[in-house]
Image: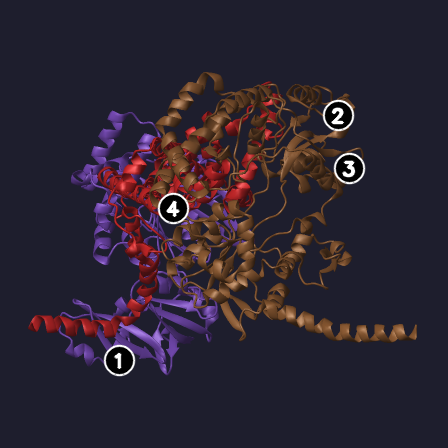
Chain colours: A purple, B brown, C red
Amino acid sequence: MSGVALKSIVKSYGETTVVHGIDLEVKSQEFVVLVGPSGCGKSTTLRMVAGLEEISAGEVTIGDRLINNVAPKDRDVAMVFQNYALYPHLNVADNIAFGLRIRKTPEIETKRLVAEVAKILGLEEYLDRQPKDLSGGQRQRVAMGRAIVRHPKVFLFDEPLSNLDAKLRTQMRAEIKRLHKRLGVTSIYVTHDQVEAMTLADRIVIMRDGYIEQVGTPMEVFNHPINTFVASFMGSPAMNQVNATLVKTEHGYCAQIGDRLVSLPQSQQLEDRVGKEIVVGVRPEYVSIVPLEGTQGVPIEVDLLETLGSEALLHTHVGDAVFVIKAETIDGLEHLHALKEIYFNPSRMTVFDAETGIALNHPTMN
Amino acid sequence: MQKLSISTLAALVAASMTLPVTASAADMNYKVTDKPLELTIHLHTKKYVYNDDWPVEKRAQELTNVSLKNVASMATNKSEEAFNLLIASGDLPDIVGGSSLKENVNQYGPQGAFLPLNDLIEEHAPNLKAFFDANKDILNAISAADGNLYFIPYVPDGKFARAYFIRQDWLKAVGKETPQNIDELHDVLVAFRDGDPNGNGKKDEIPLFARQWEELIRLVTLWDGRVSGSDTYHDFYVQDGEIRHGYSEEGYKVGISNLAKWYAEGLIDPEVFTRGSRAREYLLSNDLGGMTHDWFASTSSYNDSVSEKIPEFSFKAFIPPEGISGKRVEANRRTKVKPEGWAISYTNEHPVETIKYFDFWFTEEGRNLSNFGIEGVHYDLVDGKATFKPEILNAGTPINTQMWQVGAQVQRGFYQDYEYERQWSNKHALEGIALYEAGDYLLEPYMGVAFVEDEKKVYDKYWPSIKTYMLEMQQAWILGTSDVNEDWDKYQSQLERLGYSKVMKVMESAYERQYGS
Amino acid sequence: MQSYNEKLAWLGRHLKREWQIYVLLAPTLIWFIVFLYKPMYGLQIAFKDYSVFKGIVGSPWVGFEHFTTLFGNDHFIRAIKNTVIISSLSLVFGFPVPILLALMFNEILNPKFKKTTQTIVYLPHFISTVIIAGIVITAFSPSSGVVNLLLQSLGFDPVYFLVKPEWFRPIFIGSGIWQESGFSSIVFLAAMAGVNPALYESAVVDGASRWQMMWKITIPCILPTIIIMLIIRIGNLLEVGFELIILLYQPATYDTADVISTYIYRQGLQAGQYDLAAAAGLFNAVVAFILVMSANTISKRLSNTSLW
């Protein structure tokens, strides 16, 4: 197995540059997810690795091999496409065997490999069917089968689950994860769905406008977003962001929100920002509705309550900004409706520069 | 002197008073009705429909008090289609005219669509009666199978159509005289082939060519073969009151075998079957063609048009060479009557007025009007003969076009006057015609027959296939893909199998009915 | 009765609500009725002794007389034979050409070159048949035609192609292919444009060459279009390009060139036998109908693709 390394990768179409010099190292056997809104360059990056797009500048290596000028078929990668890209005139077995036959794999070997893959993916009963007779999930499995069967060094996934309904997507997500565990192949996965990114990735790469915003494990990017963009993009509901002024009191650094003071995580980096505008980020999950020791309550009013089952989303507001809280419903809803105060745990808060949006208390900066 | 002058004056006065009177009296003679009468007409040809505004029509209206109103449309230029649409609608105008009229009126006339004209002519049309009395053969030729006449034809004038033409300058170049018999003709063609008469050093001369390949087949008359006796190709012919078809006869066989030999020798245009209508233009203006058989007027005109390019160019008509039996024969002549003209439909409520109107065109006044246009505008009477005014002759536009534009020489039922054509013919053409006038080369014309229904069925069933077979073999023989002498017996029996004698039988009975005395 | 009234009421409501849809349908329907169904009424003249003046109704019935006449005629039988041979050969040789052209266009990457070549091959389609015939006659002329000049420069004797029965079919079919292939390739190009590009990308990653992609993706994906076009062609099998034959054939080449439509033209229309022509036309239509039905059924069985 081998890793993939991208060094200052640039993609331009004439005057327009869509990927601005990306550096990324994917370790061997690692599952990396590229995530970002549409048009951020994530698919283009993936297609450059696959060889479907020319690399305008920079270097891509797989293992120790520079592959900029290597034909797609010789890169030893396999790709799974968003709309499955199944051949409508071939049955499932022939679809899976397509790549092997192109490479003139002996027929007995091909049969064995197809059977093996069908078993892994639970497609044994469907081998004789035509793609049009399969469900979306089954088609997706065939598409993956086609990638797996070749035992490539690297798997590339281009939004493979976005054509599926929500339930199937959850199921397939788990299946992909399992598959990766079992096969241990280096994988690069593109999606615009942050949940998919969180659940699948060993590391997440968040992209925007052709730049990488942050690279990290799911928990790193969730807990320590490097800027307000990552903060709002990762997690659902998104991180609450409240405008405030940084003040220094005897209890340390505090955010002044209206006439209230809220304790912030204590960090040296805040020192030179005292008195300036900041944005305080709090995840809805990290807001407490019961008093926490050593914190002052912040008074709120519940505007709207959405129940999700075991949890509920409380829509409130701080100043003009909407502020969402996630709370457990195990004790019923009445006290949630009646909620008047909430409490912040300073260690779970992120402070961003209001001007640049960059996190001021990020662990990597300490 | 004075006395004399008085009496002269009196005579002049009298004359001046009587002149307009006689003129108006003459006008009165042509009046068909006292009250103006308007009749509707469908007259459709490929190029035009009847036009109410033609000066000739206006003039006829003044003279006869009858005006014709056109109902035909130029929406299609296919006269046959226009006629079928008209007849299928059943709503016929008073008069129907135009191209291919004969076959149509002779088919639908007996079914009741058109009025028989014989009695009407007898009673009301003295000029038409006189014409048909004098031209019994024309009357016979255009009568329907029931013996009735259903239309008044367009009767062309003049006898000659096509003639043999040869390059006199080429003859001089190869040192030969105008050929007078088959052997001389063969020698001349060989000399044209080998003697480089166009002097370009290349053996590219086409000794004998034809715009219509059927004109090549006409050469079988040199070997006493016969081709069509009408102006339709591959038609029947008449000899000594008997109807026959040339393509099944001995002379044709001999002729074809000789023509095939000439073709193989390279004396005949190798592309004769496909070069098409531009052959003459191309071969003459490129100094490649030596001899042909084609129309007098148009072929003679190349003497003027090509001489700028080839100064010594001289393409002259010559009399038919003697055939194997020593006779000189020109198998092509002008038809005596065209299948065009006009007819009275069954819906016409004024048949008597209409026939009188038709009769007007066969009076001298009407004939001049239909041939030369308006007196004083297009022609003057010189010694009692209509003569085109010089400004008309020298207008630059061909006379026939000028005449069509004013409504003369159009396909109404009228009697053409050859004078009309002679007055504007090229001098080379007139020379040629004079050559042919001097001898007696023309053959008896075949003017067509009208079938009764059963005859038509037999004819329609067998004849197209027979004709197809005849033409296939004809070309195969000329091209040398097959040999006429070897094939002849098989050819005869195949014709028989296709129904040749059945067709000949109905042709004979139809001919007998039509022309038998 | 009750249910009938209910149905009527339902129809009324339905029409009131959906009348716009029926208005949209109307022009096509009217076109079909006026131009295709109404003329069928005239087909009966195939069984009548038709006189234009007496009209369709007024003409007497003659049963199958015209058909007996037709099939009793050697030339009609020969015309059927020629029609079948010419159209089968043009199907065999002519049908694949537009597909090949489309495949070639599909592989051309330079857009300028692609457009130029496409225009060049579409062009003959817009030339009238008369001109095409003129071009063919000129090109095959024994003295000045390019074909013969080429033959002569290669040391062969010139051939008078246009009067040789054995050459008529190749020339006719060839000129037909030249005139129509380019334009016919449009439909296949359209079908190719409809192929999901991911199929090719996936194949590229799998290691397929362009040649393999053409055989394993492009052709299978446009196969339904090919089959539909084939069925339509088979339905038109007996309709040979009549104008071009009329313009190109000669009595010398009737043996291989005379087809049903030219036979009808000579026998029927030129001689005014509309009833006979209608009988031949009806025969043509019946055969075409049988052909298209069988082609459709066979295709449905073999490939699951069919017109209906």
Q: How far apart are marks 1 and 3 (CA)?
A: 105 Å
Rendered image quadrant of residue B263: top right
Please determine if labels 1 and 3 lie on a single subunit. no
Residue on which disc 1 sits: A303
Q: Distance between the residues labelled 1 and 4?
A: 55 Å
User: Do the residues bearing badges 2 and 4 touch, measured as CB atoms within 8 Å?
Assistant: no
Q: Is residue A212 visible?
A: no
Q: Which amino acid does label 2 sit on?
A: Leu
Furthest-left residue in this view: C1
Name the residue at 73% across, 44% down. Answer: B426
Q: In this view, does A264 lie to the left or right of C104?
A: left
Please determine if labels 2 and 1 lie on a single subunit. no
Q: What element carries label 2?
A: helix
Q: In this view, does C274 lie to the left or right of B141?
A: left
Residue on which disc 4 sits: C191
Residue on which disc 2 sits: B171
Q: Which of marks 3 and 2 is nearer the N terminus?
A: 2
Q: Can residue B57 be seen in this view?
A: yes
Residue on which disc 3 sits: B309
Tell which subunit mark 4 falls on.
C
User: Do the residues bearing badges 2 and 1 touch, measured as CB atoms within 8 Å?
Assistant: no
Q: Which of marks 1 and 4 is in front?
A: 4
Q: Is residue B255 left or right of residue A194?
A: right
Towards the viewer: A293 or A13: A13
